[in-house]
Image (spheres, grey):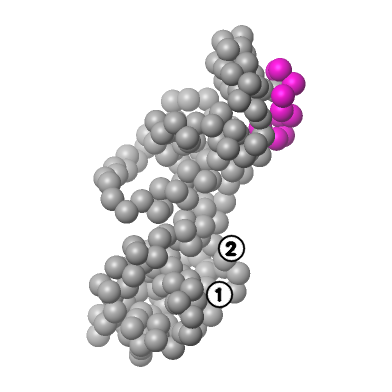
Amino acid sequence: EIYLAGGVPQYVSSNVARELLGEYLLAHKVISQGELAMALAMMPHFGGKLGDTLVGLGLMKPLDVFRLLSRQVRDKIVDVCTWQKGLYRFFRGRTNPREAFPLGLDAFEVLGAGATSIGEVTMQAWAQTVAQKRPVVTANPRVVPEAFRLGNFQRQVCQELDGRGTVRELVSRIGSVEERLTWLRTLYLLTETDLAEFDPA
């Protein structure tokens, strides 16, 4: 479950064990297995919250808990962007029933990171479906390409999208396989966020 407030990620919950905060901290070698076990045992004395428990036991500083919790939420959303199958539903107006605090996440940066994490097989399959289409930048976009914080590459790709070349033709001009994949991911991000579109002509 991903909760958004004003378009910004606010809270993410998961039933996947490795995505629980404790497992995340273990994987990043922030705490040990013994420290996690002790914190879990003491959680009822700290309101049932692992972060508060770790701080209360002196195992972590509040700022570090905040920083790592924000990173974990970001990483989980980025991971969702790489899923190749499944179903999703969007519920407008739903509020997060759990206590949460602003994480300071940049929604555009998260989307940019999600797009650059999409697997090669998925991108190549998408490229086949749009190979003969001619991409063109959208007039008067709501945000600039730089909003996704991926450097100048997005702006460079936008400059190539004049509606004259097909996706296949544009990709064929790129040398390395890795650069082609980066270009496709960027085009996918631009078209999915309405910064570019495929010319119907």
Inter-mark Cα distance, 2 to 1: 10 Å
Q: Residues within 10 Å of mark 1 (few under 14, many from 20)?
A: some
Q: Which residues are magenta?
A: 56-65
* 46 to the left or right of 145: right
Q: Quadrant of the N terminus?
A: top left
Q: Is residue 144 above or below residue 158?
A: above
Question: What kind of residue is marked 2?
Answer: Arg
Kindly identify which residue carries mark 1. Answer: 153
How far across and how far down the image is residue 55, in percent?
A: 70, 23
Please count the marks in the image: 2
Residue plotted at (55% across, 56% down): 109
Residue plotted at (58% across, 46% down): 105
Kindly identify which residue carries mark 2. Answer: 149
Residue plotted at (40% across, 54% down): 82
Question: What kind of residue is marked 1?
Answer: Phe
64 is within the stretch colored magenta: yes
Q: Residues within 10 Å of mark 2 (few under 14, many from 20)?
A: some
Q: Is residue 127 above or below residue 110?
A: below
Q: Mark yes or no: residue 105 visible.
A: yes
* 183 to the left or right of 70: left
Give the quarter of the image for residue 15.
Answer: top left
How far across and how far down the image is residue 138, in percent?
A: 40, 75
Q: Mark yes or no: residue 187 visible.
A: no
Disc 1 is placed on an element classified as helix
58 is within the stretch colored magenta: yes
